[in-house]
Amino acid sequence: MKRSGGDISQNLSALQRRLQGLDDDLSEKLPAGPAHAAAKPEALAVGDTVEIPHLNAVGTVLSLPDTKGEVMIQAGIIKMKVLAAQVRLTRQPVQKKTSVRTKTGAAERSVKMECDVRGLALDEALMEVDRYLDMAVMAGLHEVSIIHGKGTGTLRAGIQQHLKNTRQVKSYRLGLYGEGESGVTVVELK
């Protein structure tokens, strides 16, 4: 028994409509958190800390709601669009960055444990890395991380080539699982 191209096409169209209907049903059933605690889109501001209950995550608002009512949120290193009705304003601070305070001479400095150069051009990133390594050495740090992202690998390769000739660097390696893997270079300082 042969089926004509029209029968297959009709069946495919019917299946697509069914799947779209199921997708819409699932989307409507996603929890929006407690109704009394949902953030009103007009109450959100860029920089607000929000909780995303259905993802069990906390993030920072990067953009105001668009025409679809979605806001851009950054939770850790992940950026995502979420319906404004599905987030709650919170006072809980986003994960604090680790820093080390030390006294060098008369000046007290605060230096982060990582240098984030994602999105920079290679020459800008190298200048930032050099400046950061100088501050890390002055602060007495022994191991730091340079976050360059995975991308095409150009930034990673350029930074690692530069680290070979940097006098403050004892050794370097790619991050391990949980450290950022190939998106991070961990540097041991002299």
Image (spheres, helix red, strand yellow):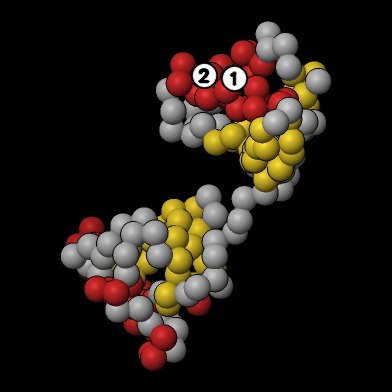
Could you tell me if the residues under marks 1 and 2 are in contact, i.e. CB atoms within 8 Å? yes
Q: Is residue 43 left or right of residue 116?
A: left
3D distance between C-alphas at marks 1 and 2: 5 Å
Q: Does any portion of residue 140 appear in the rendered image? A: yes
Q: Is residue 185 left or right of residue 17?
A: right
Give the x, y percent position of residue 139. Answer: 72, 32
Near-viewer residue (81 or 93): 93
Q: Which mark is residue 127?
A: 2
Q: Secondary structure at mark 2?
A: helix
Q: Where does label 1 land, which residue?
A: 130
Q: Amino acid at mark 2?
A: Met
Q: Amino acid at mark 1?
A: Asp
Task: Quadrant for residue 68, please give it.
Answer: bottom left
Near-viewer residue (52 or 137): 137
Q: Does any portion of residue 182 appear in the rendered image? A: no
What residue sits 45% from the left and 21% below the top? 124
Mark 1 crowd level (few <14, some 14–19, many ≥20, 10 Å Cα):
some
Give the x, y percent position of residue 121. Answer: 42, 23
Residue 182 vs 59, above or below: the answer is above
Give the x, y percent position of residue 97. Answer: 62, 50
What residue sits 50% from the left and 59% below the top? 75
Mark 2 crowd level (few <14, some 14–19, many ≥20, 10 Å Cα):
few
Q: Secondary structure at mark 1?
A: helix
Near-viewer residue (46 or 183): 46
What residue sits 45% from the left and 70% below the top? 50
Q: In the rendered image, which quarter contains the C terminus?
A: top right
What residue sits 73% from the left and 28% below the top? 105
Task: Quadrant for residue 4, please give it.
Answer: bottom left
Give the x, y percent position of residue 55. Answer: 52, 71
Q: Which mark is residue 148?
A: none
Task: Quadrant for residue 3, please give it.
Answer: bottom left
Near-viewer residue (42 or 15): 42
